[in-house]
Amino acid sequence: MSKTRTIKVDYLARVEGEGALYVRVKGDRVEEVRLQIFEPPRFFEAFLRGRGFEEAPDITARICGICPVAYQMSAVHAVEDALGVRVEGALRELRRLLYCGEWIESHTLHVAMLHAPDFLGYEDAIRMAKDHPKDVQRALDLKKAGNEIVRVIGGREIHPVNVRVGGFYRVPTRAELAPLADTLERARTHALETVRWVATFDMPDFEQDYEFVALRHPSEYPFNEGRLVSNKGLDIAIRDYDEQFVEEHVAHSNALHSVLKGRGAYFVGPMARYNLNFDRLPAQVQQAARDANLSPVCRNPFQSIVIRAVEVLYAVDEALRIIAAYERPEHAAVCAAAAEGTGVGCTEAPRGILFHRYRVHADGTIGDAKIVPPTSQNQKAIENDLQRFVERHLQLSNEELTWKCEQAVRNYDPCISCATHFLKLQLDHE
Amino acid sequence: MATATLVVGAGNAFRRDDGAGLATARRLNGVLPSDVRVLVKEGDCASLLDDWDGADAVVVIDATSSGLKPGTIHRYDAHEGPLPSVFSRSSTHSFGVAEAVELGRALGRLPARVVVFGIEGRDFTPGEGLSPEVSAAVDEVVKRVTGEAMGRA
């Protein structure tokens, strides 16, 4: 007689947004895994129709309070592609610098505040902070350096307002960037210590055979552009995204599941970027990864916490490089005039590739928009991981298994609704 | 340099009533004494610890969803005890106001006075604009926060 077990987490804490997890086990078989996501279904795509192309970066930035820069970057690249505009030189470098800031703040929040408690056996960062105040304080200081970049380049910390199609509204002087360099020099020490800290965590043994998908650029670790490549032969221009990827609606989730046509699940985000672009990391960052016991090929998703820490170190170094070489451009933006066309953009959000496509009318209004966030692309991979992980760990108690399942979901740093903020509050009346 | 009193409205304007705290902060901007700093906080609240660094009094306004009547106003003094514990585990946002307050407490980085107003929302679906009863509650919280800030000035 086989016994049925269910694992249910109604609200996943420490993932961005709202989500619920359901796993049903019968005997030694996992019969069903559902990661339920209450994503605002395509609200923003509808909201963009009829708005001016100039509004795309600021409207889409509101989709996520954690990664607004990613939405702005994919939006400006897609709109510029539609209008036939290229942004080069110092303006392009400033965009990379802004992205460094977002990676630093988003990754550091996830590594230290959301994921580390799983590894160290705490229910949350607050309880962890009581025993590990130095590690938490270091993370807050490191994150602050990222916030500072976004504030200086983006105009303010959250929902930066300085990004526009063609460049920026205002570009900083060299003198304005100088204090950032000082902050980042200190942050570099924190970043390196964070890599060392997370490298000491116990990693569950869970190597999987994934298809990783990330951008690949001829010389850079990817932020804003490149080809879409995988470890299983995918190598396409961003423009051909729709020919290879398809979104499927599934009953248990408001989010669409994205799959590779004819191949199924794929994996985007820091693990994918790292595996596909290790050779694009500067030597000192590669060395820090090796010292943290990461090999250039890494297929254990639990090690994503170490890879995120390595990417923070990279972002700090890249930001320092950009600031050192910066010469203020004469114009804050290149001219971007209304023109009819369809454009695509794909950039590396902290959580992975973020695809935007816009059709722009001759009068500059947006005809339609398509936005594919990283979390909907990872959803199938997350469910596959849970299925295999639970099957291997059926000996654990329900409580332990639930804990591990949540930890496995957080390997992907899922941004589940990319926005909601209100408190689910219950009041105990005595 | 940090001013003595900080007023923060947190939330997300694109989830209707979730924007109640933001709307309150926007209304308070410019009407409070000049030494009171007003901050509109969208997204992650972990940096609140930096925002209130050096302040000796903080008032935070956020939307809540407890099942009580929409428009209900909650008021907590963070030094009287932890914010209701379900804030942390059930928060739909991983690092919201409650987490920032509790992390500040754990690290000894909580200002001397921390008051949190919660405005009970009705509609958190994607979209803009507040429900009428929430809008009325915003008016009331604007008055109460102004009173508290003036009382200190």
Image (tube, coloured by chain):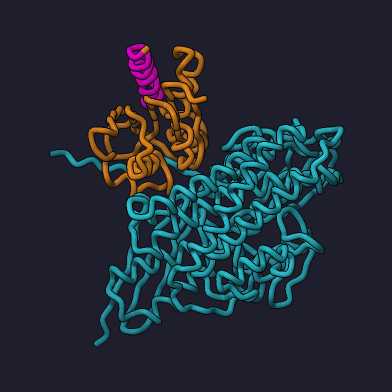
* Colour applied to chain B: orange
Task: State which chain is coloured cyan.
Answer: A
Residue A315 seen in the figure: yes
Q: Is residue A73 above or below residue B112?
A: below
Q: Choose between A38 and A299: the one closer to the eye.
A: A299
Q: Residue at x 82, y 36 (%)?
A: A328
Q: Quadrant of the N terminus of chain A?
A: bottom left
Residue A74: where, in percent of width, then height?
A: 70, 49
Q: Residue at x 48, y 36 (%)?
A: B50
Q: Residue at x 74, y 35 (%)?
A: A54
User: Any magenta on residue B142?
Assistant: yes
Q: Is residue A168 above or below residue A18?
A: above
Q: Quadrant of the C terminus of chain A?
A: top left
Magenta stretch? B132-152
Residue B79: where, in percent of width, then height?
A: 27, 33
Q: Choose between A30 and A409: the one closer to the eye.
A: A409
Residue A250 seen in the figure: no
Asked if residue B21 lies left or right of residue A245, the reply is left
User: Any magenta on residue A318?
Assistant: no
Q: Residue at x 41, y 28 (%)?
A: B131
Q: Quadrant of residue A297?
A: bottom right
Residue B2: where, in percent of width, then height?
A: 49, 25
Asked if residue B76 lies left or right of residue A365, the reply is left
Q: How many marks?
A: 0
Residue A101: where, in percent of width, then height?
A: 63, 46
Q: Is residue A269 above or below residue A415?
A: below
Question: Mainly helix, strand or loop, the magenta region?
Answer: helix
Asked if residue B2 lies left or right of residue A154, the reply is left
